[in-house]
Amino acid sequence: MATWTVSDSRQTLFDVAACALGSIEGVYALAVLNKCSVTDRLAAGQVLIIPEAVDNRVVEYYHQEGVVPATDVVDSALTIFDSSFDITFE
């Protein structure tokens, strides 16, 4: 099987699935294969085992264009809501 090396600590398993598999549809297979959760934080340099691609056209496009998404928000200052958004909203 192929492998994927996480290039940025902000990459999520969904980002890897989009790039390496061509669709986020493969994120659960990716998680099971790597014995992790779809919400686990990934570390830069972490090597993941990659199952068969879902859509090779998308994989090829990402590769040709150099697209490497990294969508995790690690800085809480970048979030939409702060601590004032609480349970008072019903």
Image (cartoon, helix red, strand yellow):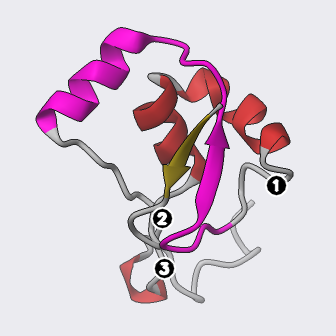
Q: CA distance from mark 3 to mark 2?
A: 6 Å
The residue depicted at 76 percent of the width and 30 percent of the height is 29
Height in image: 19 above or below 54? below
Q: CA distance from mark 2 to mark 1?
A: 16 Å
Which of the 4 image quarters holds residue 62?
Answer: top left
- Nearer the camera: disc 2 or disc 1: 1
Report crowding for label 3: few under 14, some 14 to 19, many 20 or more residues within 10 A (C-alpha): few
Report crowding for label 1: few under 14, some 14 to 19, many 20 or more residues within 10 A (C-alpha): some
63 within the magenta span = yes
- Nearer the camera: disc 3 or disc 1: 1
Read off the residue under disc 2.
Answer: 72
Mark identifier at residue 36:
1
- What is the x, y in percent for residue 86? 69, 78
Task: Give left or right: position of 87 versus 65.
Answer: right
Q: Are marks 3 and 2 in contact (CB under 8 Å)?
A: yes
The residue depicted at 52 percent of the width and 84 percent of the height is 82
- What is the x, y in percent for residue 38? 73, 49
First in sequence, mark 3 or 1: give its number: 1
Q: Quadrant of the N terminus?
A: top right
